[in-house]
Image (cartoon, helix red, strand yellow):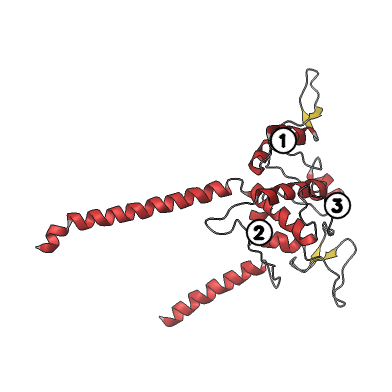
Amino acid sequence: MKWFGSLIFGCILFVSNSFAAGSGDVVLKHKDWSFNGPFGTLDKSAMQRGFQAYREICASCHSLNYIAFRNLSDLGYSKAEIKAFAAEYEVEDGPNDEGEMFMRPGIAADRFPAPYPNDAAARAGNGGAYPPDLSLITKARANGPDYLYSLLTSYKDAPADKEVPDGMYYNAAYPGNLIAMPQPIYGDDVSYADGASTDISSIASDLVYFLTWTAEPSLEKRKRTGVKVMIFLLIMVGMSYGAMRFIWSDVKKA
């Protein structure tokens, strides 16, 4: 049976390497994210910075369709701050008494408006490439957080033997290395109120924290629940074992 064990180990190693690489021969950069592991938590300061980076860098092209303004309370924002964020956006509503749709300032219950009215407009505004919604991006890609971080920090000049067509860009972390999205972060793209670093790596990291939260706002609650369930099960196993020993103690003596 040694060959069977070797086969299983080989399959696990192959799958693990495939996920670590993202796809093909692409090797991702790895960070020790605070949300990794069963006891992981999300850094609220990093998420707030990531939210600012999203608004100032990404929101002009990428939607956040599954997040409502009121969800920002998870990031530590007050009701007044959330109301102010929402009011910065124009949201289509209606119909009114005349049967017409109209625009109004956003409210906390609204979801983030998309930057384009439809998919065709999104493609037309980006040279035919469709900018994906970012709400679930870290769940939609294998090894999502590392993939996104690597993608944002791996724009570079193409090797001399690599031809880059017009409208495409070289990215060492993207499968095939050619991507239609221009480099979004150059460093110092934003100014953080807390004085945190704004180099490419730091902004990319903050965006990962924010978009990990958008993909699973209940991440911390799920992990806390999981830990409680495991503790409960361990207690029950101990009690069951003790009860079994007590019930069968006379039989064993006999």
Q: Which mark is residue 198?
A: none
Give the quarter of the image for residue 144. Answer: bottom right
Residue found 85% across the figure and 52% down from its top:
126
Please tell me whether residue 199 is drawn above or below residue 15 in the rendered image: above
Give the quarter of the image for residue 166. Answer: bottom right
Q: Earlier in the sequence, mark 2 or mark 1?
A: 1
Give the quarter of the image for residue 189. Answer: bottom right
Question: Mark 2 highlights which residue?
Answer: 144
| Residue 216 % position (x, y) | 61, 48
Q: Callout 1, which amino acid?
A: Ile
> Under tag 1, what secondary structure?
helix
Q: Nearer the viewer, residue 156 or 99?
A: 156
Question: Mark 3 highlights which residue?
Answer: 126
Specify the quadrant that holds the C terminus.
Answer: bottom left
Specify the quadrant that holds the N terminus.
Answer: bottom left
Q: Decide if residue 55 is on the left or right side of residue 17.
A: right
| Residue 46 % position (x, y) | 70, 51
Question: Mark 1 highlights which residue?
Answer: 82
Residue found 68% across the figure and 53% down from its top:
209
Please tell me whether residue 183 is drawn above or below residue 60 in the rendered image: below
Q: Decide if residue 144 is on the left or right side of residue 90.
A: left
Task: Name the mark nearer the viewer: 1 or 3.
Answer: 1
> Under tag 3, what secondary structure?
loop
| Residue 80 % position (x, y) | 72, 32
Q: Earlier in the sequence, mark 2 or mark 3?
A: 3
Residue 62 seen = no
Q: Earlier in the sequence, mark 1 or mark 3?
A: 1
Task: Name the mark nearer the viewer: 2 or 1.
Answer: 1
Report if the CB atoms under discs 2 and 3 are less than 8 Å apart: no
Residue found 62% across the figure and 70% down from its top:
18
